[in-house]
């Protein structure tokens, strides 16, 4: 009865699909895709029809998920220490040591708190008979929790009456569970989310989870290892001890001293600090030894061996070509099975034998014979279709869907009361991975008739995430982020003032043939001086600052970029041109949002110093009177005041010095003298830490493969 009521009320979301997608767009809910070696930043397709799981059904799933992850944690502790499971024949020795995810560099290391898999992403499908099957365990850098978390927040605000009438378990606990796990294993110091860079496919998630947990978002160049301890470096070069690193880059690239020496996006020496017990790493290095597709075959036996229990959740029927009997079965039934390459992820290397012609099937058979360890074979599970709203027709269209359930382990193990339901982009296609173009749905776990439930374990300490999120201060601003803040101020001002100057000009010439000029001035992405380019530059600086400024403030920059891109695609009619007044309003709303936010005043100063320095530059280019320059000059002084006595980023001094040199040529010698006095005040306070902007590096698609 509860489920039928939920389905009836959930249909209301279909009518709100455009509103929800608009909110996702304005908040930059993105998942990047690499095609032909190029990165494409796109909005993550969202479908408004939620997957609904009944309370009793999820309770059984929850027990099975906790059981499975506890067994996998026990296995990781074992194979990196006593290796008793090998001695007792639970997992053959050759499978352990030939796993690409097994790293002898962490042999003998017990992580802080004894936890290896702090965040597990368990991929399940539901068969036509309703039974759930586990397809994969993801214990390295599983992505995706942020998307249903964000979508639910929008759904709740757009249709609050729906959630008052439907008993859906609350999913807002995920940041609390994650932060609680991080705090449980932390050694001594701050918490950081380590991202490989802005162009990682799941960068939105990295920044959003840093914002929601109150952890600092760090790029590899922001961390330094000294005396086997990890430090976070602020813009002035001051060191802050790090106690826990939630890393979002693969083991191979994590530490060039220990793993791949060619990695330019790792933290040299971090593994040594980890081995010394001076920092916790979430998830632990070496976890790939347990989520290898071949090791998956042995998980049911691990549950029996380590926990003394029968598995609650079942593996898909799987065959191992390394075993003679299984290899014969696989080769005889190649046209009926699905073959998976254990070296691949993200839906790559998955081949349905029924899709191959005779010659390709024979070729695959020869590869299996030559490298039996590299492949597993599974029965094809005809898992359930779930309706999605076809974006082209607006009609219901059945699609294959899986579920990534998230299990967070710290002092206790918790299965999150939600999950990422992924659906295929093509009807009938069974590969649903986001990296292959699929979309996502929210996952509603129904509560019992007693009401909405939260995941608070008895005696667990509640982490006050709001208080944590307010700890983002100037003390944790890195050299690259100081530049981002400064240039965000400059580019948003450039957009605003340029448009303010443009409209009076356009009013005078709108009856003439100025289309080519208008296109170049407003829309040309190849013209670095166009309004579009300025908005894109502002956006590229803004997305990195989500933890510091908050998603709500950054919405306005997202909206401005969407508006200018959309207008450029539709040719720039007169109506489109005057819609650009909205872009100027977006800039005003952004500045107002930052000014009235709880962000520390000194951090705000970094933006507004850039803003008013840019305004003085533009006003003097446009020949404004000395009287008209008094207000921005006073504003510049007021925002420099909170920085009195503090180190000053080099970009401040360089920007000011350049402008002082230009002003006499523009006829503003007196203004140059006044700004020169500010420049003298910076003497001895300028931070000269070298900038290595790896945050903007086109990094490898590390967790796209796992999503």
Image (tube, rainbow, N blue to C red):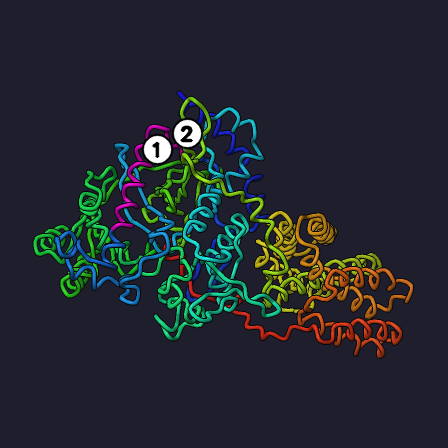
Magenta stretch mostly in which secondary structure? helix
Identify whether 669 is placed above or below 355. Answer: below
Residue 576 pos. (x, y %): 70, 52
Which quarter of the figure has residue 262? bottom left
Mark 1, residue position: 58
Choose between 527 and 306: the one closer to the eye.
Answer: 306
Q: Is residue 71 left or right of residue 153?
A: left
Q: Any magenta on residue 643? A: no
Choose between 337 and 187: the one closer to the eye.
Answer: 187
For the residue carrying disc 2, how many other residues have a C-alpha within 10 Å: few (<14), some (14-19), or many (20+)?
Answer: many
Residues under labels 2 and 1: Cα distance?
8 Å
Choose between 536 and 626: the one closer to the eye.
Answer: 626
User: Quick one: SS at disc 1?
Assistant: helix
Q: Is residue 537 left or right of residue 262?
A: right
The numbered disc on residue 446 is 2
Discs 2, 1 touching: Cβ within 8 Å: yes
Residue 540 pos. (x, y %): 59, 61
Residue 682 pos. (x, y %): 74, 72
Q: Earlier in the sequence, mark 2 or mark 1?
A: 1
Q: Any magenta on residue 73? A: yes
Residue bounds of the magenta highlight:
51-74
Task: Report the quarter where the N terminus lies.
Answer: top left
Which quarter of the figure has residue 513? bottom right
Q: In this rendering, does residue 579 appear at all?
A: no
- Residue at image coords 48%, 49%: 44
Identify whether 211 is placed above or below 109. Answer: above
Residue 374 pos. (x, y %): 21, 61
């Amino acid at each position: 009865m509860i489920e039928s009521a939920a389905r009836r009320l959930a249909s209301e979301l279909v009518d709100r699909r455009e509103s929800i997608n608009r909110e996702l767009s304005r908040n930059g809910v993105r998942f990047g895709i690499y095609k032909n070696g190029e990165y494409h930043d796109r909005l993550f397709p969202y479908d408004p029809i939620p997957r609904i799981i009944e309370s009793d059904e999820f309770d059984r799933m929850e027990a099975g998920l906790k059981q499975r992850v506890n067994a996998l944690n026990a296995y990781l502790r074992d194979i990196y220490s006593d290796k008793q499971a090998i001695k007792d024949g639970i997992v053959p020795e050759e499978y352990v040591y030939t796993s690409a995810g097994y790293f002898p560099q962490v042999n003998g290391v017990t992580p802080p708190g004894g936890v290896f898999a702090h965040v597990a992403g368990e991929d399940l499908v539901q068969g036509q008979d309703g039974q759930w099957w586990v397809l994969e365990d993801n214990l390295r850098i599983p992505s995706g929790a942020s998307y249903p978390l964000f979508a639910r927040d929008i759904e709740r605000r757009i249709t609050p009456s729906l959630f008052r009438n439907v008993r859906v378990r609350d999913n807002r606990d995920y940041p609390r569970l994650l932060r609680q796990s991080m705090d449980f294993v932390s050694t001594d110091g701050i918490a950081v989310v380590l991202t490989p860079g802005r162009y990682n496919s799941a960068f939105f998630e990295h920044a959003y989870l840093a914002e929601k947990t109150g952890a600092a978002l760090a790029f590899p160049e922001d961390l330094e290892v000294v005396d086997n301890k990890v430090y976070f470096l602020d813009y002035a070069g001051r060191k802050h001890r790090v106690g826990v690193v939630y890393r979002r880059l693969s083991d191979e690239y994590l530490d060039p001293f220990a793993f791949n020496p060619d990695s330019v996006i790792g933290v040299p020496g971090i593994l040594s600090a980890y081995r010394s017990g001076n920092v916790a790493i979430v998830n632990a290095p070496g976890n790939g030894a347990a989520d290898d597709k071949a090791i998956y075959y042995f998980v049911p036996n691990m549950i029996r061996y380590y926990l003394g229990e029968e598995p609650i959740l079942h593996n898909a029927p799987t065959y191992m070509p390394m075993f003679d009997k299984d290899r014969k079965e696989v080769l005889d039934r190649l046209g009926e099975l699905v073959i998976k390459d254990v070296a691949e992820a993200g839906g790559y290397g998955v081949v349905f034998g029924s899709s191959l012609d005779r010659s390709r099937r024979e070729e695959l058979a020869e590869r299996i014979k030559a490298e039996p360890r590299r492949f597993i074979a599974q029965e094809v599970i005809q898992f359930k279709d779930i309706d999605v709203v076809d974006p082209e027709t607006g009609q219901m269209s059945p699609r294959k869907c899986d579920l990534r359930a998230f299990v967070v382990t710290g002092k206790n193990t918790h299965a999150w009361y939600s999950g990422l339901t992924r659906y295929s982009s093509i009807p009938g296609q069974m590969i649903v991975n986001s990296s292959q173009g699929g979309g996502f749905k929210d996952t509603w776990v129904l509560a019992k008739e007693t009401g909405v439930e939260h995941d608070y374990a008895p005696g667990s300490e509640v982490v006050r995430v709001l208080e944590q999120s307010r700890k983002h201060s100037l003390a944790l601003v890195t050299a690259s982020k100081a530049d981002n803040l400064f240039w965000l101020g400059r580019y948003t001002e450039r957009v605003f003032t340029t448009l303010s100057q443009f409209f009076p000009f356009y009013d005078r010439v709108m009856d003439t043939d100025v289309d080519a000029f208008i296109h170049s001035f407003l829309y040309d992405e190849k013209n670095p001086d166009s309004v579009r380019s300025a908005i894109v530059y502002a956006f590229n600086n803004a997305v990195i600052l989500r933890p510091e400024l908050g998603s709500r403030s950054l919405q306005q920059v997202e909206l401005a970029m969407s508006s200018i891109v959309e207008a450029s695609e539709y040719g720039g009619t007169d109506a489109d041109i005057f819609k650009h007044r909205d872009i100027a309003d977006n800039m005003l709303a952004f500045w107002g949002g930052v000014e009235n936010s709880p962000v520390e005043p000194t951090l705000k100063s970094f933006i507004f110093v850039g803003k008013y320095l840019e305004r003085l530059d533009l006003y003097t280019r446009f020949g404004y009177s000395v009287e008209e320059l008094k207000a921005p000059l006073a504003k510049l002084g007021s925002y420099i005041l909170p920085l009195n006595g503090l180190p000053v980023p080099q970009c401040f001094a360089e920007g000011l010095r350049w402008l002082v040199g230009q002003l006499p040529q523009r006829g503003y010698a007196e203004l140059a003298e006044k700004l020169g006095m500010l420049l003298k005040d910076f003497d001895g306070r300028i931070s000269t830490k070298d900038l290595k902007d790896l945050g903007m590096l086109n990094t490898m698609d590390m967790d796209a493969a796992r999503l």
